[in-house]
Image (spheres, helix red, strand yellow):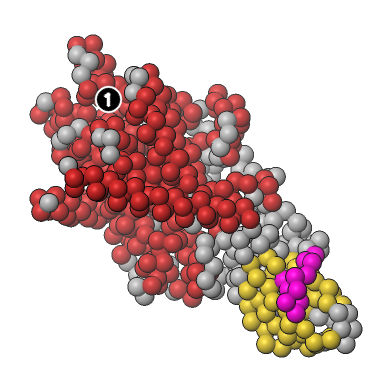
């Protein structure tokens, strides 16, 4: 046990040392602009407000969209922001919390890839080569310093952990492997929707290979673990899918997919920039020179060795090489029909996001080199060092800013590129905050209190009239007049809530709660968590008996 602890601590120290050039910019004061990074800080501050308002799971932002609100976390992946709250509660601030999440994603992704590759290829040098290539790859630098996608950054940590669980399911018949895949894939679902779909393609190839190899028991147990992951994350994905028809995203795509297919030379020719790919100064789709060389090297060795001997290492190398080549085909425009018509894949607008999965596969298969003798292993280490040298000059932001926490915590934008999460009944978007939360034609309002999930006030009216509450309606909002539920009208161009109130003095109370669909989704997740713990306890009892 002590040896294992020492080993894991040693890997973490190594991860910090090798990751240091990439995390150094996050250790400076302030932050730096990226496409999404600063919005992550705004979302983290809003998640804090929603949890502070006792809204759990967090779904409806009462502060963003100029305080008119909208269902942000009903659709936007919430897990990174739940994790970020740990740093906020430790008094490290919203900017500090976001930066630490990015930095931790670098260190932990090295750690998880090192464990996977070293266990898979049964060699610690394989772990070092794979983990280094996993960090020092162009797409990773783009994600950290250009795009700033916190969800993708954390997804890179989960990819290797999921496959470690798959390996456990393949090798042993206990519940632990099922639990590992269930938990980590559930985290991936709640961490980044797109990465879940794309990594799911790789899982599909694993299942296909197992079926061909007649490993039916393994396939059954892996499918059960995926079902567990769906149940654990049901609180998020069920409402996100079944309520999508209520928001603008169901009608208008964020981008034209045809503009973002990759040309073969794009994968090879280095290109660095801080803009979007379609801009002259946009980032490129390069795989990385060292990564390309090492993949081609592995490809040649695998096909050469498989002809001589079909052992476990050669078959594994062949599977990873062929899977990488098959998935890479989706980069190119002739697969547009597949992107347009395959469920879930059709929701993705940027084919180049496949780079995340491809870089994972290339990094993992590079560990195969250590099985080919010391000379070839040394070549692998040299190529890993080359990857570091080629990437470090570009591992920096365009410039730094120091806006302070209050800049982000008081930002009232929607944090989305095209307001795509706005309910369809909102015809006119607000461009500034309201002057009064509750508007009446004539009358008095007293004791007004409101947050992201509640509003209450006393109302005195000389005559019956329509009261406007400047909060955008979304299913789950209910309003009661003197304790009796009343009808909410939101047919106005702003999509905000209006109620009819008779003359006299009244107590108005509004509450945002779970709909039957969301409540059922929450219940599924709770039952799955209980089942998970019971399974782990039972598994521990069996191990103690043995």
Task: Identify the residue under disc 1.
Answer: 316
Q: Give the range drawn in magenta.
A: 479-489
Query: Residue 432: percent from the left, percent from the top?
Result: 68, 71
Q: Nearer the viewer, residue 289 or 129?
A: 129
Local packing at callout 1 (Cα closer than 10 Å; few below 14, some 14-19, many 20+) is some
Q: Does the magenta stretch include residue 431?
A: no
Query: Residue 83: percent from the left, percent from the top?
Result: 40, 61
Asked where in the image residue 474 lies, by quadrant, the reply is: bottom right
Q: Which quadrant is home to the C terminus? A: top left
Question: Where is 457 relative to 316, above or below?
Answer: below
Residue 284 visible in the displayed image: no
Question: Where is 380 relative to 458, above or below?
Answer: above
Q: Nearer the viewer, residue 104 or 55?
A: 55
Residue at the limit of the structure toward the top, as seen here: 307
Question: Where is 288 relative to 84, above or below?
Answer: above
What residue is drawn where x is 24% and y is 48%?
541
Q: Is residue 485 magenta?
A: yes
Residue 15 visible in the displayed image: yes
């Amino acid at each position: 046990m002590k040896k294992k602890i020492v080993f894991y601590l040693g890997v973490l120290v190594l991860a910090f040392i090798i990751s240091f050039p990439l995390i150094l910019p996050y250790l400076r004061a302030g932050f730096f602009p990226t496409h999404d990074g600063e919005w992550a800080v705004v979302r983290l501050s809003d998640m804090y407000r929603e949890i502070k308002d006792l809204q759990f799971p967090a779904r409806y932002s009462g502060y963003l969209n100029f305080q008119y609100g909208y269902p942000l976390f009903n659709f936007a992946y919430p897990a990174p922001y739940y994790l970020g709250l740990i740093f906020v509660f430790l008094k490290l601030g919203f900017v500090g919390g976001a930066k630490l999440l990015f930095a931790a994603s670098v260190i932990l992704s090295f750690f998880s890839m090192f464990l996977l590759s070293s266990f898979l290829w049964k060699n610690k040098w394989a772990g070092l080569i794979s983990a280094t290539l996993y960090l020092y790859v162009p797409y990773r630098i783009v994600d950290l310093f250009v795009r700033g996608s916190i969800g993708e950054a954390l997804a890179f940590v989960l990819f290797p952990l999921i496959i470690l669980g798959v390996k456990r399911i393949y090798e042993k018949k206990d519940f632990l492997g099922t639990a590992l895949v269930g938990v980590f894939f559930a985290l991936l679902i709640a961490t980044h929707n797109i990465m879940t779909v794309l990594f799911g393609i790789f899982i599909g190839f694993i299942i296909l290979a197992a079926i061909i190899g007649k490993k039916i028991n393994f396939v059954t147990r892996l499918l059960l673990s995926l079902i567990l992951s769906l149940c654990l994350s049901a609180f998020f994905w069920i409402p996100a899918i079944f309520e999508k028809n209520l928001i603008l995203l169901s009608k208008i795509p964020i981008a034209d997919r045809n503009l973002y297919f990759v040309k073969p030379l794009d994968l090879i020719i280095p290109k660095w920039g801080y803009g979007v790919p379609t801009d002259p100064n946009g980032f490129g789709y390069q795989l990385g020179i060292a990564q390309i060389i090492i993949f081609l090297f592995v490809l040649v060795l695998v096909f050469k060795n498989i002809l001589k001997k079909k052992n476990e290492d050669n078959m594994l190398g062949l599977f990873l090489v062929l899977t990488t080549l098959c998935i890479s085909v989706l980069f190119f425009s002739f697969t547009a029909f597949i992107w347009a018509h395959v469920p879930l894949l059709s929701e993705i607008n940027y084919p180049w996001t496949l780079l995340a999965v491809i870089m994972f596969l290339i990094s993992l298969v590079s560990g195969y080199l250590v099985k080919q003798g010391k000379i070839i292993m040394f070549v692998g280490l040299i190529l890993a060092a080359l990857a570091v040298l080629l990437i470090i000059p570009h591992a920096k932001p365009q410039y730094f800013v120091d806006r302070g926490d209050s800049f982000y915590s008081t930002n009232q934008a929607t944090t989305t590129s095209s307001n795509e999460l706005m309910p369809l009944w909102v015809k006119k978007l607000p461009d500034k905050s309201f002057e009064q939360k509750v508007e009446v034609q004539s009358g008095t309002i007293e004791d007004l209190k409101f947050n992201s999930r509640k509003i209450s006030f006393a109302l005195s009216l000389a005559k019956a009239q329509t009261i406007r509450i400047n909060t955008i309606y979304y299913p789950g909002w209910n309003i009661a007049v003197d304790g009796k539920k009343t009808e909410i009208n939101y047919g106005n161009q702003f999509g905000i809530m209006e109620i009819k109130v008779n003359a006299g003095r009244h107590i108005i109370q509004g509450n945002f709660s779970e709909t039957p669909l969301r409540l059922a989704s929450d219940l599924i997740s709770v039952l799955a968590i209980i089942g998970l713990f019971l399974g782990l306890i039972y598994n521990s009892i069996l191990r103690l008996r043995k």
